[in-house]
Image (spheres, coloured by chain):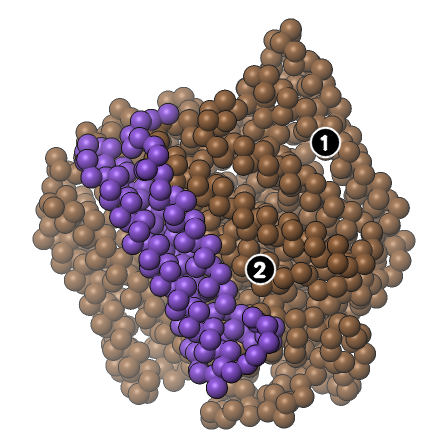
Amino acid sequence: MSAHTVPPPPVPPDTLEAFEKTWSSAPGFLGMLREVNNIPIAQRYMVTGFAFFLLGGLLGLLMRIQLGSPENTFLDAETYNQIFTMHGTTMMFLFVIPFIEALANYMLPLLLGTRDLPFPRMTALSYWTYLFGGIFLYSSFLFGAAPDGGWFAYVPLTNVEYSPGINMDFWDIGLSVAEIAALGAAAEMIVAIIRMRAPGMTLNRMPLFVWAMLVTGVMIIFAFTPLIVGTAMLELDRKELTAFFKPEAGGKPLLWQHIFWVFGHPEVYIMFIPAAGIVSHVVQTFSRRAIVSYTLMVLSIVATGFISFGLWVHHMFTAGLSAVALGFFTAASMAIAIPNGVQVFGWIATLWAGRPVWRTPLLFVLGFLVLFTIGGLTGIMVGSVPFDWQAHDSYFLVAHFHYVLIGGVVFPLFAGLYYWLPKVTGRLLNERLGRWNFWLMFVFFNVAFFPMHLSGLLGMPRRVYTYPAGLGLETLNLISTIGAFGFAIGIALFVVNVVWSRRNGELAGSNPWGSDSLEWSEASPPPSAQFVRIPVVRSRHPLWEHQDLLPHDPQLLGQMEDLNARPAHWRGALVVSTVDATPLAIAHMPGSTIAPFTMAVAFLAIFVGALVDRAEPLAAGGALAAVALFLWFRPQASETLALQELGGRKEDPARLQLAVGGPIANGWWGMLVLISILATALITTIASYFYISDGPSGASQLPLSITQPALGTILSLLALVAVEWALRGVRKHQSIATRLGLAAAWIVSAGALGLSIQAFSGAGLEPERSAYASAVLGMLGYQWLVLIILLVTVAIGLLWALGDPEDRRGHSVVHNIRLMAAFTGVSAVVVFVVVYVSPRL
Amino acid sequence: MSREIGTGALVVAFLGAPTVWALHLAVSYFLVSIGCRTDWAGAKAAVLLATVIAALIAIGFGVFAWQRWRWARGGRGGGLLDPDHVREFLALSGVVFAALFVAAIIMSGISPLFLPLCTTS
């Protein structure tokens, strides 16, 4: 290994000054609200996530006080229900996932060698939405109405008949906000990783944390979307507008379990895979050698992502499913041990073959290896149907998933914090406090959670607020409570360490650990204007194996010239090809704007309106959303400047063009991600439709009239034709064709929407009384949503076309509209076939 | 001499077998549901047939990936993988994936041989 030694040639001071000014944050309170740069937003995200971690931990301690002795009256049953529901909800939705996304928001651009995430406004929107969602959820305590139906919200317990207050409405709606934030962050991660890497960072040179976040981003899309659909269905049921899960109307309570666990099991791996990515970096750095078998580690990450979607039924082994079906999911539960085992052996082999330096991050990794292996072994036990029948819903499960989640996720996160916080703050954390922090957490974690295996095997059920004396559970529970407080002291020590080290910690320098990846080539803390020069990568371990990060190839040298402290007056970042990371173009990155904050406030108003069933907040939210959309999409001066500087360039391999119009633009890839989300929602809705239709209120009893819906479907397809016409106008510089095409697309799409609504209204269906009618409404409501999104995007394109038809930003919008119109056409046909044709077959 | 391999072919080689595994799981679960609801006597055989077909398709993706790996390697000697060659990496990954997911398909798909179809827990 050779160190990264050769400094780059200096950049002229005036150019550097202009460049830094361009990337600097706006000052003051308003500037904070308008911030879109990934570094400050990610810092806020991390602090907020950690605050929720402490809140969730506090709730856990209250539970342990209650369970510390039998027949305790510290908490009553209702309060305990609220606290255990909010503990799980907080840890899963408000701490782990957002914290991982925050870490990724901060680290990914640094690891990839780029200047920001691809959609900075989305970064800000995700944060504000998450913050407001969390506050919304916790505000329920002020009304004595905190969610109380468990973090899994099983029906019929959470139907309005058995949970009549607004407690579970808070859960349903608050969660939706957090889910939207997660999807936004996933889109950011995916597009950043596939389009914005440093030149030369081919897929097989990507750091393992980057691979982990790519897989995690894709998993969030396929896992969180069904939950959004499910929570929407549950909320509609609770508002007595539908009957998806109501057995008396032909609804299926088990459908909720399927939807929830299609999300819930991949969720475990959505948390674990990034943790595994962190572990790989820490092991590699502190073993002082490359990770053993990089290729197998990558394959394990991807395989785990896939197989995790085939495990959800192992949460339903006692729900009465057929034996063969259980066999499928047991097989998958065993199969996932293969990639996980490969990773564990890969880390151990790396430590074995290296020269380990036992600093705090590596201690936390060691703790992770021990605890996650124990959690994994008990996971294999409960993945076996006969054992699960015995241990299900007992404290054995509580022990198992805390070993997996705290051992497998929280310990690696602490390893990551000790490893990467010096990059964030510029100062090392105190090593002695770190060791105390680790040992307290490790020892007391086992004191708290190991006895739960035994109390579970002795028959203690989970989710109970107390237990009678004399069952042999007293001592085990008291030990668990003592352990929980010891563990909390360990966490508190971490907070002390961070606060102390912020002022007194040793200065970190750019690469305090002698690591290999690009984040350590920047100053600690990195400036807002990170990567004045875009680094060039020639191996998997650039800081270990390169003398410099400069372009050597003459063509690359020329291409990078436009990115050396440039663009000076607008924010620009490099776009590369997906597989080879060959430079393709320079993307314009939007600057500070109040639009994301406004949009998040609009979401909050809409969700408050939905909670209290009042039109005023809904109307206010709708109006604010319109304002936010206008602020978001209105022409930006910096973008005009970018077009003036680079927009006129002819195709020339020696110079990079502006990334605008079609697949070269990040926005086009963002639209693909949106379509993936919508496609996943469609699959969930179709599966729900068939699951519900197969029953006494089924489709065969009520075939629906087909004429109007058929006409609506044809109109949806005509919209695609009209958009194609508009795109042709763009390519041939025929502004009239562009305008007419978009106007026609808008009119026929509106017609399709009107016809579909009219057909449903005229069918005489009663979704509040019939699960089948609810399923039809679900399918059609989905299509209405898709059509509304198309109408909004076409309207934005039309405004561009009417303003300046030659503006290439408008052309980009038309390219994106074409993707959306194509998807709308396909989904219209699918919905038509499912709702109107399949009952006739 | 190595042949040019497009991004689309690499995506197919890399993700083909896992996708077949996912589809096989969905189809098998669907067949069992239909079989149990309608007392369809052929449901077990249908699951086994789906398993054989899925395994063969996944093997096909493995062969496809192996061929791309050979093309990417060209005449190069030495180890299985050149760490600097991204196409070799993706194609060989496809081969390994095919092996893993063929095994996973078979592990799932043989359960009708040993278990009653519709006995519930």
**Can you tell which quarter of the image residue A716 is in?**
bottom left
C-beta proximity under 8 Å, tags 2 and 1: no
Chain A painted colour: brown
Residue at 42%, 77% in the rendered image: B6
Position of residue A123 measured from the top left corner of the image (x, y, whole percent):
57, 60
Q: Quadrant of the N terminus of chain A?
A: bottom right
Chain B painted colour: purple
Distance Cα–Cα, label 2 vs label 1: 31 Å
Mark 1 nearby-residue class (10 Å; few <14, some 14–19, many ≥20): some
**Can you tell which quarter of the image residue B82 is in?**
bottom right
Camera-side residue: A618 or B73?
B73
Camera-side residue: A66 or A399?
A399
Q: Which residue is mark 1?
A: A446
Left or right, B105 with reference to A464: left
A460 shown above or below A296: above
Q: Which residue is mark 2?
A: A296
Camera-side residue: A196 or A327?
A327
Residue at 83%, 46% in the rendered image: A434
Residue A526 seen in the current view: no
Give me the disc on residue A147. Answer: none
A728 shown above or below A188: below
Position of residue A285 measured from the top left corner of the image (x, y, whole percent):
75, 60
Chain containing the residue with disc 1 = A
Residue B112 seen in the current view: yes
What kind of residue is marked 2? Leu
Mark 2 or mark 1: whose residue is earlier in sequence: 2
Foreground mark, 2 or 1? Answer: 2
What kind of residue is marked 1? Asn
Disc 1, SS: helix
Mark 2 nearby-residue class (10 Å; few <14, some 14–19, many ≥20): some
Position of residue A424 measured from the top left corner of the image (x, y, whole percent):
75, 59
The tally of labels here is 2
